[in-house]
Image: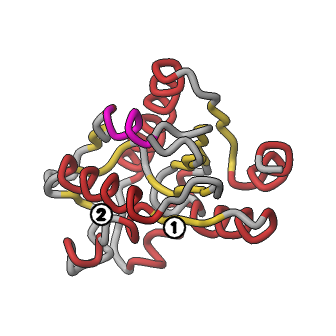
């Protein structure tokens, strides 16, 4: 459906937004945040709360928003997730059909040191985070991205935040 999107996922706090915005600026690519496209701030009054009550609904809103905002002939980086914390705080995969509908040109996962991510999130959100749950989320993101890549036959690049910008110079030119 959308084909002109490179999807960049990774756990909350890994630095996706900062990295994606930097790449977009450098290569004159349009930046989209999944949270902004689906209007997360209207669904959740506490932006520090990472739990999603209805993951299917949010993904429907994402697809509708992308359909309105994405134009042929332009390239986009979509900053999002492969998995989310559900209403119970457990890691849950985003429905596969979301990725089929986006039909990204490429898939990316940014990973990082869980201790550093935990510290960053706690400083930013002023609340504690569970190391084990963050590790589970990062592992699930990587595993699911691999599965999606194989199913939709699109390339997947997994890298750390430190080397992602260097890697992007070959991917986004």
Residue 41, magenta (yes or no): no
| Residue at x 20% of width, y 47% of height | 56
**Label 1, label 2: how far apart the Cα atoms are:** 16 Å
Q: Is residue 49 above or below residue 147?
A: below
**Circle 1 residue:** 119
- Residue 45, image quadrant: bottom left
State the colouring used for the structure image: secondary structure
Which residue, given by chain and number where applicable, does mark 2 sit on?
A: 50
Residue 108: % across, % down = 61, 42
Image location (x, y in percent) of residue 51: 23, 59
Q: Nearer the viewer, residue 119 or 145?
A: 145
Residue 101 falls within the magenta-colored stretch: yes
Residue at 57% across / 49% down in the picture?
Answer: 5
What is the x, y in percent for residue 170?
85, 44
Figure quadrant of the N terminus: top left
Q: Residue at x 33, y 52 (%)?
A: 63
Does dot 2 land on a helix, a strand or a loop? loop
Mark 1 lies on a secondary structure that is helix
Q: Which residues are magenta?
A: 97-102
Q: Which mark is residue 148?
A: none
Magenta stretch: helix, strand or loop mostly:
helix
> Left or right: where does residue 120 sit relative to residue 89?
right
Give how far across and how far down residue 9 sits, in percent.
52, 48
Q: Nearer the viewer, mark 1 or mark 2?
A: 2
Asked which quadrant contains residue 109, the reply is: top right
């Amino acid at each position: 459906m959308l084909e002109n999107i490179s999807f960049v996922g990774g756990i909350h706090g890994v630095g996706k937004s900062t990295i994606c915005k930097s790449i977009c600026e450098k290569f004159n690519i349009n930046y989209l945040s999944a949270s902004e496209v689906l209007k997360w701030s209207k669904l959740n009054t506490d932006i520090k709360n990472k739990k999603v009550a209805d993951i299917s609904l949010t993904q429907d809103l994402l697809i509708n928003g992308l359909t309105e905002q994405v134009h042929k002939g332009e390239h986009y980086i979509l900053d999002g997730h492969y998995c989310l914390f559900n209403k119970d705080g457990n890691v849950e995969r985003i429905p596969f059909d979301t990725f089929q509908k986006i039909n990204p040109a490429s898939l990316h996962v940014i990973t990082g040191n869980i201790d550093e991510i935990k510290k960053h999130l706690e400083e930013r959100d002023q609340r504690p985070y569970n190391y084990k749950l963050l590790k589970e989320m990062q592992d699930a993101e990587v595993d699911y991205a691999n599965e999606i890549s194989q199913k939709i036959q699109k390339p997947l690049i997994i890298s750390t935040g430190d080397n992602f910008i260097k890697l992007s110079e070959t991917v986004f030119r």
